[in-house]
Image: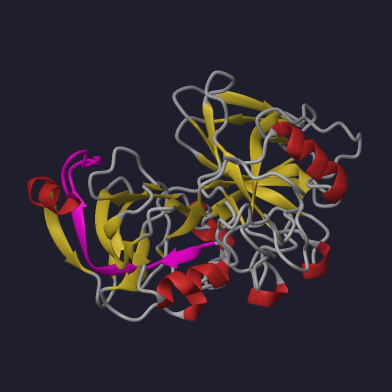
């Protein structure tokens, strides 16, 4: 049953309110994830879970010591993942000292973290922002799963990552983190009526014309004008370039990996099939500390493209008290089978907000040294500043 009462909660005291003595529904903040770890509901089969893995409303997951190059992606259905590995494996790779995962290949890695969740807690996984921005497609798999990136309430068992680099080959090692998981206790996401109230109270997004589109989420549009100075509107990934070490920040020259895209007279861009683009939203985004947000997939009936592999926005993203005044959403964009034209201001995705069970002890931004707090159009942390 959905929570009732004050949608916004009390920033000093918490997010959702407890109803009739039951724990509140919503996304678990970092301190609640810490409690699950302490109670051995989340544990590691290798090294202890590091405090640095705990984000404001999610947990970074780490690669284990073995990777399997597999013939094809799969869902285990009624089986355990381990029962499928032998039939699908082409070869085994030791990640202890690091190994290269090649573009166009599919890999399966058992993660260090294992779950023994309470019956009231489920999970939802997504690539980390830096993973999506280098076009690495990764999904979480559990035993007997019928969906990717979903962990059923009460799940007890290992976690696996399916990894497929699409544009750049990557260097990973045991302990590298490519995806993250949120934990939820019951409860639906915010309704459109709640989003309208939240927009009025907290200004979730900013638009110069004040025209906010809320329909199964709050709409974001594409910016193909730029800042009026550099006229830069995006980047297109180059092919056949160097290797990216996923654990090293600020090491790569962006000009070796990316072509800049500038505004044109038509204020539009043609997406070439199977090419990868980094673009940005026109609207700055704000996630209040007692909420988390997620970018939902674009309606496939409206366009032949996919936006945003990494759909999680942490509590405090773009929040002024955390050192930001709204931050634009950086979008990982791909066309599918045919060329597709995007025009400035076209809707490219929708943000869904969900309350937390309580305000996190740390929020996105200065508290945790976040890479993208005050971002405009920005490449992943692996690259030096463009000069």
| Relative height, residue 13 to residue 48 (above, below) | above
Residue 252 location (% of width, % of height): 52, 68
At 90% from the left and 35% from the top, the residue drawn is: 210
Give the residue at the far left of this rendering: 87
- Expressed as whole percent of the image width and height from the top left, the position of residue 376 reads 74, 55
Is residue 223 shown to the viewer in this render? no
Give the residue displayed 74% in from the left and 67% down from the top.
13
Residue shown at the point (75%, 33%) measured from the top left: 193
Q: Is residue 291 visible?
A: yes
Q: Is residue 277 left or right of residue 210?
A: left
Using the rendered view, name the quadrant where residue 10 is placed: bottom right
Observer-nearest of 127 and 33: 33
Nearest to the observer: residue 355 or residue 344: 355
> With 50 as the anchor, is 378 left or right in this view?
right
Question: Vertical placement of 308 versus 99: above or below?
Answer: above
The quadrant of the rendering that contains the C terminus is: bottom right
Q: Residue 317, located in which quarter of the rendered image?
A: bottom right
The magenta stretch is 58-80
| Furthest residue in direction top, as rendered | 301
Q: Which quarter of the rendered picture does the N terminus lie within?
A: top right
Horizontal and vertical percent position of residue 308: 55, 43
| Colour scheme | secondary structure
Q: Is residue 60 magenta?
A: yes
84 displayed left or right of 277: left
Residue at the (52%, 56%) spot, across then down: 257
Q: Say whether residue 167 is magenta.
A: no
Could you say which is closer to the camera, residue 372 or residue 85? 85
Q: Residue furthest right?
A: 209
């Amino acid at each position: 049953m959905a929570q009732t009462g004050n949608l916004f909660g009390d920033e000093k005291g918490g997010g959702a309110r407890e109803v009739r003595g039951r724990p509140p529904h919503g996304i678990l903040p970092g301190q609640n994830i810490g409690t699950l770890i302490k109670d051995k509901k989340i544990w590691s089969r290798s090294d202890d879970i590091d405090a640095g893995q705990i984000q404001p409303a999610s947990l970074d997951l780490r690669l284990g010591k073995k990777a399997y190059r597999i013939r094809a992606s799969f869902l285990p259905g009624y089986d355990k993942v381990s029962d499928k590995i032998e039939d699908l494996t082409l070869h085994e790779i030791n990640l202890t000292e690091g190994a290269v995962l090649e573009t166009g290949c599919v890999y399966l890695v058992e993660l260090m973290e294992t779950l023994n969740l309470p019956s009231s807690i489920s999970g939802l996984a997504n690539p980390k922002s830096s993973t999506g921005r280098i076009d690495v497609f990764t999904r979480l798999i559990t035993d007997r799963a019928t969906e990717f990136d979903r962990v059923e309430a009460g799940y007890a068992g290992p976690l696996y990552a399916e990894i497929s680099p699409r544009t750049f080959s990557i260097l990973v090692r045991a302990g590298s983190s490519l995806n993250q998981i949120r934990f939820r206790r019951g409860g639906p996401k915010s309704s459109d009526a709640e989003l309208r109230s939240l927009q009025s109270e907290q200004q979730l997004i900013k638009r110069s014309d004040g025209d906010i589109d809320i329909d199964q989420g709050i709409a974001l549009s594409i910016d193909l004008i730029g800042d009026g100075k550099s006229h830069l509107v995006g980047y297109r990934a180059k092919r056949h370039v160097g290797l990216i070490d996923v654990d090293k920040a600020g090491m790569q020259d962006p000009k070796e990996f990316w072509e800049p895209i500038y505004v044109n007279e038509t204020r539009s861009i043609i997406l070439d099939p199977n090419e990868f683009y980094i673009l940005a939203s026109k609207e700055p985004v704000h996630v209040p500390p007692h909420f988390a947000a997620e970018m939902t997939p674009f309606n496939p009936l409206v366009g032949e493209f996919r936006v945003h592999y990494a759909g999680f926005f942490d509590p405090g993203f773009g929040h002024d008290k955390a050192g930001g005044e709204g931050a634009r959403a950086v979008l990982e964009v791909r066309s599918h089978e045919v060329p597709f034209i995007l025009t400035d201001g076209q809707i490219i995705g929708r943000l869904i907000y969900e309350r937390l069970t309580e305000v996190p002890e740390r929020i996105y931004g200065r508290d945790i040294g976040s890479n993208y707090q005050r971002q405009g159009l920005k490449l992943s942390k692996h690259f030096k500043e463009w000069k």
